[in-house]
Image: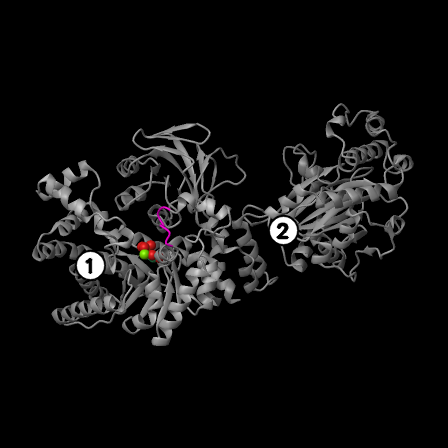
Amino acid sequence: MQHDQEITVITPTAKLATDTHGGRAKCLQRLVRLDLPVPKTVALSFDEVHGIAAGDMPDMAAMLAPFGEDALLCVRPSSEDPDWGGPGAVLNIGMNDARFVDLCETLGRDAASSIYLRFVQAYAIHVARLDPDMFDHILPDSADALSEALRAYEDETEEEFPQDPAVQLAEVLRSMARAWEGTTARLLRQAKGAPADAGLGLVVQEMAHGLGLGECGSGVIQLVNSKTGEAQITGRYMCQSQGRDALLNRSASMFLEEDDRGPSLQAVLPEPFEQLLEHTRLMRERLREEMQAEFTIENGRVHILDGVRVARSARAAVRIAVSLAEDGIIPREEALTRIDPRAINELLHRQVDPAAPRDTLATGIAASPGAATGRIVFTADEAQASAARGEACVLVRRETNPEDIRGMHAAAAVLTERGGMTSHAAVIARGIGLPCVVGASDIKFHIRKKMLVAPDGRELHAGDTVTIDGSNGEVLWGEPPMLEAAQDDAFRSLMAWADEVRDIGVRANADTPADAQTAKNFAAEGIGLCRTEHMFFDADRLTVMREMIFADTSQDRAAALDRLLPMQRADFSELFRIMQGKPVCIRLFDPPLHEFLPSDRAGHRELAEALDLPLSDVTRRVEALGEYNPMLGMRGVRLGITVPEIYDMQARAIFEATIEASQDGDAVVPEIMIPLVSAKREVELVKTRIDAVAAAVRNEQGQEFDYRLGVMVETPRAALKAGEIAPHASFLSFGTNDLTQMTYGLSRDDAGRFMSAYVQQGVFPEDPFHELDTEGVGELLQIGAERGRSARSDLVLSICGEHGGSPESIAFSRAAGFNYVSCSPFRVPVARLAAAQFAV
Ligand code: PEP
Ligand code: MG
């Protein structure tokens, strides 16, 4: 069926839009409006192309009319988003025996033959769908290459090569339209985020010949380095070439820059080179984007065939956005929105060079971003020994527990068999910026034999070198090339602009002075969660801690706690000193006590020796502390109520450190947070004791100080009862790790085993420990926030679970009127940028 719809020639005023004709057509119109030398182009809309695929062909005579009699044409795809791809371009449409004769006159025989040969091959492969191998025997430079190709075509199709340009064009359009609608193409683009009904536009453009007499060729040019974003004129040019030749042919004869392969374009054609630069600069300025110009030079004349957004690394994206803003081309707010906050991670950590080949052994959960290489060790002690020798190591464990922390600090990366996004290994690794992959259950872990077996059967032994890519969850063989972290001036400018506009606070979860320093370097506005239990795992403290746990009498316990007191005081003083008056929120002791005790017989024996107790005594006591379900057992405030001396000691340490720190600078107002609360009475009881400790310290030292007491909302009941709890608390901080665990009834330490099956089958849209479940857990947050605020209007609200730094939870927290989010120090910049994007 023929149609007489209007043919849309791309002119400055033609009605074209990205969502009707695709990005390429729209961009070409912008180039036309800039008066750039763009060859004549016709745009076909999504609807027209869809019609073509269904057999509704436009009038070919009308389609060809805008082009000159002798023009050769090319057809290129124009999808809404260039990343969705599309069928390959077909060039030189219109080439036939008659034009061949003409072109021999105007361009020379070699160029004419080459153009015809290229077209026959492209047509055979893309339109007639013949096997590309059928041309393998033809040498393109030989005198009879063209006639051989035509013969091969005719033998294979039993038809003459079509000579009518209208037929050629119609067939090319039909084949491209149908290719887009094929199942494979659809699945591929859907995987890149395209909707199921994404349309394809096509552009039909007059060819500028890159082949022929005089200086002819084609290439691309851009004004920045794609890896770094630094200003640098770069690109490729190849003389006597068309289409993608210059990009595909590494041994091209002439390059944009001078190198050992030949003189530069600038040296050979200074004037066209200057024009290209001018055109590309104009594109940057007026299209408000760093563009790559695709060009052809035809007998010394420049044609701009297309402009595409320069491909860029995350690091380059930041520099490009910042320099566009600094040059006044885009406002700062827009620069902020141009960067994907998650891509910032790539700038904060070393990365495996994306261009390098990867030998992937296995994949697990990407628990903490960045990449590091090291020799495999299987215990925390070996990790420390390795660090002492100055040798980078990867700590491999079934899962980690608090005893492994020092080993983790010593390691370059961590790999575990079990666990999910909020498992111990994941939380600690993110906190200290250590690349980490957890839940790599495809690998067989033979920890005792000190051996791993990859899914493909390859064995890895202690001492073998592997690379952990915590950004995408891969375990790689050997040592691939890396890209360094890049917190350069452009990054700092972007972050400063983000801070100017965002309207929600960003604090960091920091347990140690090193964490606090990192948090401060990343401009966190304070510490939103200091998990104090991590302070008790150093060898000197662990023994005292164990003495405290084993104390028979309140007096013995007090004696052990007296020894812990100065250590805790020093910890807090150091944190206050580093944070220089910025708020520090300290969570009172949270984990079950048994985590501090050895779990095997050798450990029990050692402990019996250290405490001078019979082994049987130690074993019995350890067993007695064991719980069936420790995460729901004697931990958090439950410990604070049943063994109140621990919180008393911590409160005293905090207050004494407060007085000490306030002497040298601004008055410190510590924030103290009670974990795992589920009832108002728990808060009342703890508050009474802490107030008493505060009064005692004020009295003893004759010094005044203020403090704030708050509650961690980690149980569904605490969220529901926030209205009763809030009058006793000046802040509520939602611990979304435990709250997610308890809302779903899903173990945060074990969910990794089946989470991927759950996500794959659509039970959960995402791992709820990774992305805040705004519907379910979110409803509890909202209820908690509303009930809390209506009981106490000045109640400070925050999130301090691992979700804190993710853009989704920031959006949620802003909407719910929270004051701040708190996240791992390394995620602070991501959170600052995401928060700014929601505010602009
Ligand atoms: C939480 O539960 O969200 C939390 C921050 O505490 P932790 O991860 O230490 O249990
Ligand atoms: Mg918790």
Q: Residue at x 35, y 67 (%)?
A: 720
Q: How far from the left and from the top, in percent, is residue 178?
A: 75, 44
> Viewer-proximal residue, 756 or 468?
756
- Neighbourhood count class around disc 1 (C-alpha, 10 Å): few under 14, some 14–19, many 20 upward: many
Q: Which mark is residue 97?
A: none
Q: In which quarter of the image is residue 172?
A: top right
Specify the amino acid type for callout 1: Arg
The answer to whether 768 appears left or right of 249 in the picture is left
Q: Quadrant of residue 648?
A: bottom left
Q: How far from the left and from the top, in percent, is residue 99?
A: 89, 38
The answer to whether 363 appears left or right of 572 in the picture is right
What colouring does the structure picture have?
one colour
The answer to whether 173 appears left or right of 613 in the picture is right
Specify the amino acid type for callout 2: Ala
* Residue 723 higher or lower than 83, as above or below: below
The residue at which mark 1 appears reads as 569
Q: Residue 803: within the magenta? A: no
* Residue 334 higher or lower than 407, as above or below: below
Asked if residue 113 can be seen in this view, the reply is yes
